[in-house]
Image (spheres, rainbow, N blue to C red):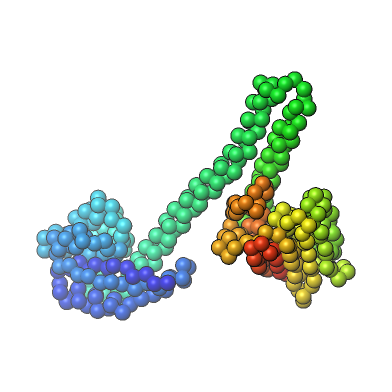
Amino acid sequence: MNEKLRLLVVDDEPGMRRGSVRALRSFSFPVKEIGLDVSFDLSEAGSGSEFRSRMEKGPFDIVLLDYKLPDCNGLELLDFLQKSRYDLLTIMMTAYASIEVAISATKNGAFDFLAKPFSPEELKLVVRKAGECLVLQRQAKKLAEEKKQIRFQFLSVLSHELKAPLNAIEGYLRLMETKSGGDSISNYEKMISRSLARIDGMQKLIYDLLDLTRIESGQMKRHLSDFNFAESVKKAIETFSPDAAKRNVKITFEGAGDIPFKGDPGEMDIVLNNLVSNAVKYNRPDGKITIRAALSGEFLDISVSDTGIGMAQDELERLFSEFVRFKKDANKGVEGSGLGLSILKRIAELYNGSVSVQSKENEGTTFTVKLKKQEQK
């Protein structure tokens, strides 16, 4: 990525201006921290009035400013820049180098100080320092703004996700409060059941949020041990078999005996629960789910295939983002936090692994997860 900064040389000596421009014309440098190559678009001004005129047509990023000009001095122009709140850095140049001038320039907002005469190397060094500082400051500001925007979007989505079930529960409670269904408790069993289902959904959302936050902050406590992954698969099948049976969905595990693996069994439960749960929820009545797991060197390969509703290509591209749920007729009434696959991806990254998906609408979906055996630290 390239970044071209606009640099203005302000000096009443034509030779000094041309020499500075010549030294910087082909000068560029990398800012490795953000993968940026910086070069310069150069302009000149020979007086304070020309400088002000140039600034009106700007903007500029860096100003090389002579301390003594025919119609004013550099400190006056520094004061002008401070009051105008330009987003730039100033380097003061002067043949009258002294500690007093340097202190005054710094107090008035100068980024650095360059005493005449200076070599091209000295000029490049101070300009590079200013350029690096400027692009890093701007990158930090950009990231801070992005972080603020992401936080706002996150809270907006979270508020929306919690608002609907809370409103539903409140509505049911109001009906029970006014006894609109009569005095018999049996008349309210459906309302109670639906309220409890909404509460379960909110609890799942909160637990998923906690898991996601712990993983991203590095605060998730991991308990690595040697265990049989095949047993984890069987446990997940047992957990979701009742839901699968309601829709006559058959779950098959194609595993070759024991599958010894080193990792966190709890994290494996999260991975399998997300995969199997989705395969059940988004399957069709009388559908099938096939789970495969096998070791390949240091890696554990897992795949979960279903014969469900499938997804379109544009849906696959957004699948692993937070709060992503695709609302369409085929999955109407399917509840979820929209965080499960995002958590799954982050767990895969903890194992130096990956997660991928293949899907076709109305035919089914296959998730493939690759996890590397963990070493005890």
Q: Quadrant of the C terminus?
A: bottom right
Task: Say left or right for 77 vs 336.
Answer: left
Q: Inspect this view and state whether residue 210 appears.
A: no
In depth, the one of 292 and 147 nearer the eye is 292
In depth, the one of 117 and 274 nearer the eye is 274
Q: Is residue 67 above or below residue 178?
A: below
Q: Position of residue 304 (x, y in %)?
A: 74, 64
Q: Position of residue 252 (x, y in %)?
A: 82, 63
Which corner quadrant of the image does residue 25 belong to? bottom left
Which corner quadrant of the image does residue 354 belong to? bottom right
How many marks on residues? 0
In depth, the one of 127 and 222 nearer the eye is 222
Q: Position of residue 335 (x, y in %)?
A: 67, 47
Residue pictured at 26% horizontal, 74% vertical: 118
Task: Say left or right for 358 vs 112.
Answer: right
In depth, the one of 97 and 265 nearer the eye is 265
Q: Inspect this view and state whether residue 200 appears.
A: yes
